[in-house]
Image: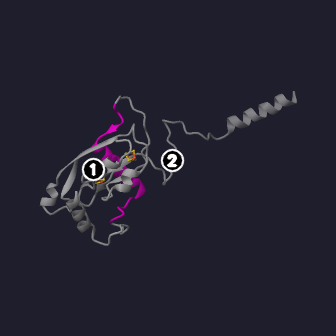
Amino acid sequence: MFSGIKGLIVTIKTSLRKPITAQYPKVHAPIHERYMGFPALTWDFDISEPYCVGCMVCIRNCPTQCMTATMGDNPLYAEEKSPRRKIVESFEINLGRCILCNICVEVCNFDAIEMSYEHELSTFERNGRRIDLSALLEMGKKYQKESSWTPPIAKGKAASKKAPETKIEEEQKEV
Ligand code: SF4
Ligand code: SF4
């Protein structure tokens, strides 16, 4: 009898408790600012073009070989509006194979790729996790906004003390 009342009290207390789990996918739990989601490409809002020059360094270093890219001449460079001689033309990451290792971010010399807050993997399509250039840039823009991202080179974090434009041009000559 006594244990029955005790059990009833526990049941009532539990049913009145504030839920501690989010009703996913209707509700998304807040992301911690240090959360590391899938990689995304960053956007240079000053020049209105991607930071990525398509140099392939990240692709060569990706342990799961889940990235591809192509580069081309940058018309804005010819017009002296951009310091990037080459620019990315296409980029794809198969997020279904990405292991969130951060290596692509570490090896990029152009601040062009960052681990975003994006973590959704579910999709209705067989190849739905193959993300193209425009989707990667949208992910990057969203991340830049949410994290108030500033490129490390612009912040003077780069080891080199050269101006960013000079550094970009010199590195592109080596590609
Ligand atoms: S290393 Fe950076 S600049 Fe080069 S292709 Fe990858 S993201 Fe683009
Ligand atoms: S985080 Fe790792 S596995 Fe994912 S794309 Fe970058 S290098 Fe490849």
Question: What residue sits 27% from the left and 50% below the top?
Answer: 56
The span shown in magenta is 127-153
> Toward which corner of the image does residue 163 lie, by quadrant?
bottom left
Task: Confirm or reject: label 1 Cβ below 8 Å from ligand 1.
Answer: yes
Q: Are marks 1 and 2 in contact (CB under 8 Å)?
A: no
User: Residue at label 2?
Assistant: 30
Task: Tell me the quarter of the image containing the N terminus.
Answer: top right
Q: Nearer the viewer, residue 133 or 96?
A: 96
Mark-to-mark CA distance, 1 and 2: 34 Å
60 to 80, vertically: above or below: above
Residue for point 36% across, 36% down: 129
Which is in the foreground here, disc 1 or disc 2?
1
Q: Tell me where residue 159 appears, x and y as whole percent.
A: 36, 68
Relative to 2, does residue 168 appear above or below in the rendering? below
Q: Residues within 10 Å of mark 2 (few under 14, many from 20)?
A: few
Q: Which mark is residue 56?
A: 1
Q: Amino acid at mark 2?
A: Pro
- What x and y, as percent, mark residue 114? 38, 53
Reply above or below: 131 against 80: above
In the image, taking residue 27 as reference, residue 114 lies left or right, namely left
At x 19%, y 55%, the residue is 86
Q: Quadrant of the C terminus?
A: bottom left
Q: Tell me the kind of residue under disc 1.
A: Met
Tell me the SS state at disc 1.
loop
- How many numbered circles are shown? 2
Residue 149, quarter of picture: bottom left
Residue 97 in magenta stretch: no
* 131 part of magenta stretch: yes
Badge 1, how many Cα within 10 Å: few under 14, some, many 20+? Answer: many
Q: Is residue 37 left or right of residue 174?
A: right
